[in-house]
Amino acid sequence: MKIRITNGRVIDPANKLDTVTDLFIADGRVLAHGRAPEGFAAERVIDATGLVVCPGLIDVAARLREPGFEYRATLESEMEAAMAGGVTSVAIPPDTDPTLDEPGLVEMLCYRAKKLNRAHIYPVGALTLGLQGERLSEMAELVEAGCVAFSQANVPIVDNAVLMRAMQYAATFGFRVWLQPIAPFLSRGGYAHDGEYASRLGLPGIPVAAETVALYTYLQLAQATGARLHITRLSSAAGLRLIEQARADGMDVSCDVSINHLHLCDRDIGHFDANCHLIPPLRSAADRDALRAALAAGSINALCSDHTPVDDDGKQTPFSESEPGATGLELLLPLTLKWAQETDTALPAALARVTSDAAKVVGITKAGHLAPGARADICAFDPAASTTVSRQALKSQGKNTPFLGRELPGRVRYTLVEGQVMFGE
């Protein structure tokens, strides 16, 4: 279909474009912007007056809960949530059931997603079989099946010799290794940040050292092996300093932060709000503020939803017995806009963290920008409108989030995937 999007504020951070102009789409690709190509006759015209038109958002961490956890969410429900949130590309952690350690399973997941004709998915394969930290997965075969990187999700490898072998193998072939820094023995038995609020509530704490000890190990092993390392869901200022020091020493390492840790801290647990039971735990206000500033400065490369749908049975229990995780696909854009407003971050720079910068983390070249020839994955949103987070409004099957009841800036009006309008009027 040939589509003309008119009068929108087109923001393409990758190409430093920020202007009110028209966008022309044909055959699932961006054809041109500004002046219509010769002979172009639009089959549909979308009036984007007052809207921001940007590349479709890229979420570097979202669990769609298939296979194995369909009682919490289905691929269909979470794809609809992605469309409502303007998210057109999603990287999926490997902690499904069974885990993403078998090429056939990855191929099946990619096939299912393609048949649904919604967001593009980018599976992150299991670094070790069953995430058990013992035997390496068949990484080369998993890449052929569609995996873009390898991870342990939030299941750390206890044996550093195994981790080093995994990094050596990945480095040999240039595969990306994504690791969440969790020292298993320091975090064992903990449920919240080891600080004043956990002490008041009587919750066993998880110290910042659980992040920094693991992170230091990962950085040392990556430097020794030459592995391409990405740190997922950074939660502390101390962890951030380790990454900045590694970069100062010449190491190429990227990192991301979740929308939850960008806006919340340990005091938001309040009176045992299980919606704030997350991995990693919400840290101190000082940690949160450091992460916000680092994202604005570009020290943190990408912002993700860390979308983890949990059913009501998993949350309506005592805090320490509740299931960790929160829904977030539909909140990625409004919480990005909220952070930008509160930190005076320019809109193009803010959108870069969930478009072009996120594309670099995942390794996508045909999305995350609007240059002619790019895949026409597009989000058009109204920056002047607002979104009230409610269980009824959320498309995701997971209705639990710390932001329930809050009014957030921005509302998605249209989502296009490969030039097809998948959300909107």
Image: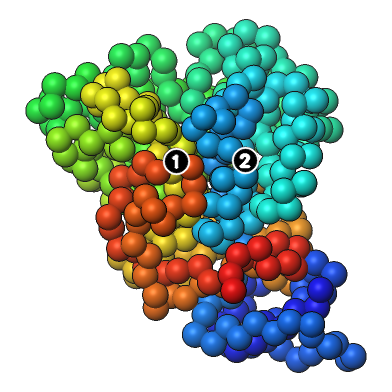
| Residue 62 falls left or right of residue 206 | right
Say which residue label 2 marks.
75
Residue 315 screen position, x and y as percent: 33, 31
| Residue 358 falls left or right of residue 261 | right
- Neighbour tally class for label 2: few under 14, some 14-19, many 20 plus, Cα within 10 Å: many
Considering the image in quadrants, where does the N terminus appear? Answer: bottom right
**Which residue is at a point 40% across and 49% down the rendered structure image?**
259
Circle 2 SS class: helix
Circle 1 SS class: loop
The extreme left residue here reads 200
| Badge 1 or badge 2: first in the primary sequence | 2
Q: Nearer the viewer, residue 179 or 96?
A: 96
Q: Nearer the viewer, residue 174 or 42?
A: 42
**Which residue is at a point 35% across and 56% down the rendered structure image?**
389
- Disc 2 marks a residue whose amino acid type is Leu
Considering the image in quadrants, where does the C terminus appear? Answer: bottom right
Residue 37 screen position, x and y as percent: 84, 88
